[in-house]
Amino acid sequence: MLGAAVMSAMLVAFGATSALAQAGNDIDCSLTSTGNTPINDLGTGTYEGAEGGLYPGGSNEITDDHFALGMVRASEIIPRNEAGEPDPDGKIVFASIGVSNTRREFTAFLSVAGADPDMADSIVLVNGAQNGEPVSAWLDPSAGVWQLFDRALTNAGVTAAQVQAAWVKIPEGFTTEPPAFPTNALEYRNELTSALRTIQDKMPNLQVAYMSSRIYGGYNAVSSPNPEPNAYEEGFGVKWVIEAQMAGNPVLNANPDTGEVEAPWVAWGPYLWADGTTPRADGTTWQCGDINSDGIHPNGAGSDKVAGMLLDFLHEEATADWFFGDPVVVTEEPTGESVTTSTIAGDTGLTEAALPTTSPDSRGSGGRQETGSEGATDSTRRDRGDRGDRSDPTSTTDAPTATTETTGSTLATVTVGEREAVPPIVWALVGVGVLMLGFLAVRAMRRGETEPPDDDLAQ
């Protein structure tokens, strides 16, 4: 009797949980295109009046003067001790800052970069991206996201003073319909600017920040923290932040010769968005098989794709020579040459007054974490000696495996996995099932006390 009651209650709970888990599958693989042109393919063409190209003038090439400033800032990236002082035995921390997508992608990057024999031994990779924390959560220097970021650094054995480069991919999250373009992208530009200023304050030796916007978000069939076309349109927000710094906007000043440094030098890292299955000029696509069943997050294949794009970018980027143990050599000083920035209808200008206040996240997260993120500190570090000649074909490093530490070698990794967040209603139904189980168990025991003993057992 008791066994049957327990089994019935368990079946009720399991059935409710399974049904809701199926209902939580929000991916729709038929949503293969928005019809929008990737910004790097748009060139001098326009989207809703906004000019394309990653950089001003519809170009995908950085201007000479901004590049020169980047080389000056990157030349300061050298091994440093925990106090941030130059030290040949010190470390260079390259950290990620962003949301759960960023976190997954940088976790994959830990493996691909750790397996690259060219990565310098002084490099420590720290995954500071956090689940459920969009750009608005990073504005306040006292917010909970920064406590968790500091914990990630501590667990990696480094300090904020050793963080000298970052991959910044922190989109906004929406629980309701975003404003129409370009208001959404302008608001995002302002928030991202404020976040970069806070990031610079928290990491005084941060020199460069490579920026990325979202991957394709069109496969989500129900709702999304960042739906299309917003995932596409926020790319313009990133573009306009970079343009503002290139134009010498003082709220983003990155040149120590022209005033107080307010932000790291910013430039595009890998541009990730492609219109679903429609190939970009370089062949990049986002297939449904690259995306998790929630329609939002990249799965393993999608994360590996982004990780590969980031590593390829670093190999090709002159301001990232430090990543491979080579000094960044300054050949030209920046002249402060002005650039013509995009003209955006309705833009009141990027001024200090226009920046959002550094108050805690309006969503009330204050450092809230999604399921499975507590204490997660992904990092990769190399600990021993010089890596030698980059062209040496005998210099190899085995790819690290998750949750393992290779001691006494040139590479140690700590990778903490991420669980999928379970909808609260699922837990509620599980709770109901447990209560039913308890009720039926008690009832069965009481009936057992009042019924006559079984004849076979009495003998």
Image: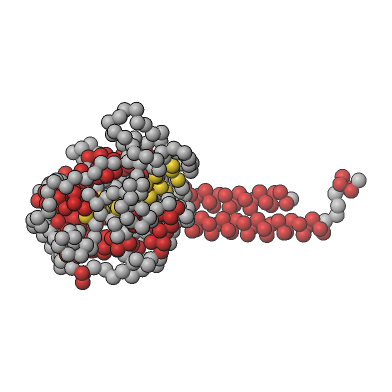
Q: Position of residue 418 (x, y in %)?
A: 45, 49
| Location of residue 225 by image quarter | bottom left
Q: In the displayed structure, does residue 334 sit left or right of residue 434?
A: left
Taking depth in this image into account, of 452 and 222 the one nearest to the observer is 222
Please identify the residue farthest to the right as the structure is shown.
459
Residue shown at 26%/68% (left/top)? 356
Residue shown at 23%/68% (left/top)? 355
Q: Is residue 434 visible?
A: yes
Q: In the displayed structure, does residue 289 sit left or right of residue 36?
A: right
Q: Position of residue 59 (x, y in %)?
A: 12, 47
Q: Position of residue 261 (x, y in %)?
A: 22, 62
Q: In the displayed structure, does residue 449 sit left or right of residue 366?
A: right
Q: Is residue 27 visible?
A: no
Residue shown at 36%/47% (left/top)? 89
Taking depth in this image into account, of 43 and 155 the one nearest to the observer is 155
Q: Is residue 192 above or below residue 75?
A: below
State the count of labels: 0
